[in-house]
Image (spheres, grey):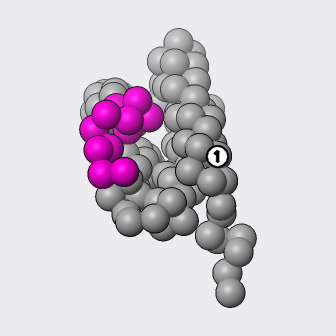
Amino acid sequence: MGNFKKLRVWKAGIDLATDIYKATRQKPFAGDFGLSNQIQRAVVSISSNIAEGDERATNKQANYFFFVAKGSAAEVVTQLNIAYNIGYLDKQIFKDLESRASQIGASLNSLIKARGGFNPIDHKK
């Protein structure tokens, strides 16, 4: 723990955030402040929560933040689908970004399992 910059999933999240910011600055996406702001916030949340989780003292604490990051990746997939359906993204860019966001979710599943698989959200006392 505590070396989040070495996690491939953290780096993938940073790269995805960079590319989503670039996509949301292009017309017509740039004109929709609500959706562009929401997807930007969700994609930034992915790597931010991975970093915060990796800095926690226990796997249980870390997994909580990894689950939050996984939820943010699902938000990004949803928002990308909306953006594509209303014509803000061309098909190739949409497929690339959606695939990468989905892969981050799958990688987070693996990281959670490697850290004991405990879901603190489902096991409240």
Q: Residue furthest right?
A: 122
Q: In the rendered view, does 48 fall on the left or right side of 124? A: left
Magenta span contains residue 125: no
Residue 56 in the image: x percent, y percent? 37, 63
The residue shown at (70%, 75%) is 123
* 92 is higher (above) or lower (below) than 86: above
* 27 is higher (above) or lower (below) than 70: above
Residue 35 in the image: x percent, y percent? 44, 49
What is the magenta range?
Answer: 1-11
Q: Secondary structure at mark 1?
A: helix
Residue 93 in the image: x percent, y percent? 48, 18
Residue 54 in the image: x percent, y percent? 38, 53
The residue shown at (64%, 71%) is 121
The residue shown at (52%, 26%) is 100
Q: Residue furthest bottom?
A: 125
Q: Which residue is mark 1?
A: 113
Q: Main secondary structure of the magenta part?
A: helix
Q: Quadrant of residue 14?
A: top left
The residue shown at (32%, 58%) is 55
Which amino acid is tagged 1?
Lys
- Badge 1 density bin: few <14, some 14–19, many ≥20, Cα 10 Å: few
Residue closest to the eye, 41 or 111 = 111
Residue closest to the eye, 77 or 48 = 48
* 71 is higher (above) or lower (below) than 120: above
